[in-house]
């Protein structure tokens, strides 16, 4: 399972080296962790400091510079929903299917994934801004 904060080393003898670059507060990273755990895929977790992204991390996601990034045998995959599809396709014979077979049910899963990304994350950002503002006010009083 996830081995947090261990140095990043690739093992030449291991055919399936899986490293997840994430941030503890990101639900997009959590959904990738849940998928890896559901499938029973061992992985190493690297916590990324979003205020100080290292060169290695930036080289894995130079376009968006965002977590999560899954590095599978040295090959990076970015964007949480694309990572989930990759996990489901590459390890199709392991654990439960992440996407159901039925097209209507697949559409439902995609609808709620988009809802999470468009609405829930936006709402969470607003709540955390309000809570920061409240905390600043409390300190001043
Ligand atoms: N569409 C992307 C969004 C990724 C994203 O925005 N990640 C945030 C954390 S939740 C991030 O790393 N932001 C970069 C930053 O704050 O500098 C996905 O689903 O993976």
Image (cartoon, rainbow, N blue to C red):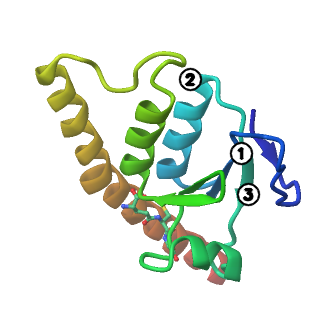
Q: CA distance from mark 1 to mark 2?
A: 17 Å
x, y percent for residue 129: 45, 70
x, y percent for residue 85: 38, 40
Judge the density around disc 1: few (<14), some (14-19), many (≥20) Cα neighbours within 10 Å: some
Decide which of tag 1 and tag 2 comes sooner along the chain. Answer: 1
Find disc 3 in the rendering and name its residue: 46
Q: Quadrant of the N terminus?
A: top right
Q: Quadrant of the C terminus?
A: bottom right
Q: Is residue 27 above or below residue 68?
A: above
Find disc 1 in the rendering and name its residue: 17
Residue drawn at x 60%, y 78% is 59
x, y percent for residue 132: 54, 71
Q: Secondary structure at mark 2?
A: helix
The dot on residue 38 is 2
Residue drawn at x 65%, y 59% is 74
Q: Secondary structure at mark 3?
A: strand
Q: Disc count in the image?
A: 3
Q: Could you say which quadrant of the image residue 92 lies in?
A: top left
Residue drawn at x 71%, y 45% is 17
Query: Camera-side residue: 93 or 7?
Result: 93
Tell me if the residue at label 3 has its CB under 8 Å from ligand 1.
no
Decide which of tag 3 and tag 1 comes sooner along the chain. Answer: 1
Judge the density around disc 2: few (<14), some (14-19), many (≥20) Cα neighbours within 10 Å: some
Residue drawn at x 52%, y 42% is 32
């Amino acid at each position: 399972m996830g081995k947090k904060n261990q140095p990043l080393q690739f093992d030449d003898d291991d055919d399936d080296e899986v490293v997840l670059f994430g941030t503890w507060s990101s639900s997009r990273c959590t959904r990738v962790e849940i998928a890896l755990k559901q499938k029973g895929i061992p992985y190493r977790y690297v916590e990324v400091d979003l205020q100080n992204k290292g060169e290695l991390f930036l080289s894995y996601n130079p376009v968006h510079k965002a977590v999560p990034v899954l590095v599978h045998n040295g090959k990076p995959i970015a964007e949480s929903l694309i990572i989930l599809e990759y996990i489901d396709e590459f390890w199709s014979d392991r654990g439960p299917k992440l996407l159901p077979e039925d097209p209507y049910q697949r559409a439902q899963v995609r609808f709620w994934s988009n809802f999470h990304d468009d609405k829930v994350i936006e709402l969470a950002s607003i709540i955390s801004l309000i809570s920061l503002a409240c905390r600043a006010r409390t300190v001043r009083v």
